[in-house]
Image (cartoon, rainbow, N blue to C red):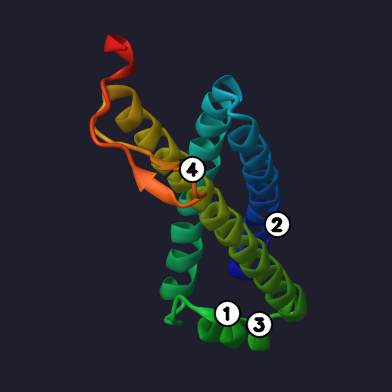
Amino acid sequence: MNDTTLLHLFSEDIGHAEQLLELLESETQALTSQDLTSLETILTSKQTLLALLDQHGRARSRVLVSLNLSADRAGLQALAKASAQGEELLAAGDRLSALLRECQDTNLRNGRLIRASQTSVTKLLGILRGAEVPNLYNNRGATSRVGYQRPLSQA
C-alpha cells in the first residue's frame, strides 16, 4: 500500500515538475521581452505548483518515516528492495530529482536575468536623476567623466 501511495505521489509530482519547467522557460522568455502581464500569470501558476510539490514532498517523507526509513534516497532504496514495484519507485524518484534539478538551474538563470535587469534600471534611474554621471568619450576616444550633470528633468 505504501509503495503504491509513493508511486502515485511521484507520478503526480513528475507532471507538476514538468509543468513548472515549462513555466520557468516561459518566464525566461517573458523576462527577456519584459512582458510584465505574462510574468504575473506565470508567478501565480508557479506558486501553486510549488505548493503542491512541497505538500507531496512532505507526504512522501511521512510515508517513509512511518515505515521507519529515512526520508531520502537511502530510505527509498530500502523500500524498493522490499517492494514488487521497487524499480518503478526508484525510476520515478530519479526522474523527479532530475526534473527538479533542471527547474532549479532554470530558476537560477532567471534570477540572473532579473538581477541584470535591476542593475540596468538602477543605473538608468541614476542617470535620469542626475546622481550618476555616465562615462563619455572625449576627442581622443578615451572615456572621461563629465563634471556636472543636471537631471534630465531640469535639462
Q: Residues within 10 Å of mark 2 (few under 14, many from 20)?
A: some
User: Which of pointers 2 and 4 indicates the residue nearer the eye?
Assistant: 4
The quadrant where residue 76 appears? bottom right
Seen at 53% across and 47% down, the residue is: 113
The tag earlier along the polypeptide, 2 or 1, is: 2
Q: Secondary structure at mark 1?
A: helix
Seen at 51% across and 33% down, the residue is: 43
**Pointer 2 residue:** 11
Q: Amino acid at mark 4?
A: Asn
Q: Which mark is residue 76?
A: 1
Say which of 39 and 31 sits in front. Answer: 31
The tag earlier along the polypeptide, 2 or 4, is: 2
Say which of 134 and 142 sits in front. Answer: 142
- Asked if labels 4 and 3 touch by Cβ distance under 8 angstroms, the answer is no
Q: Amino acid at mark 3?
A: Ala
User: In the orientation shown, which residue stands out farthest toward the front?
Assistant: 139
**Pointer 4 residue:** 139
User: In the orientation shown, which residue stands out farthest toward the top?
Assistant: 154
The tag earlier along the polypeptide, 3 or 2, is: 2
**Pointer 3 residue:** 80
Q: Secondary structure at mark 4?
A: loop
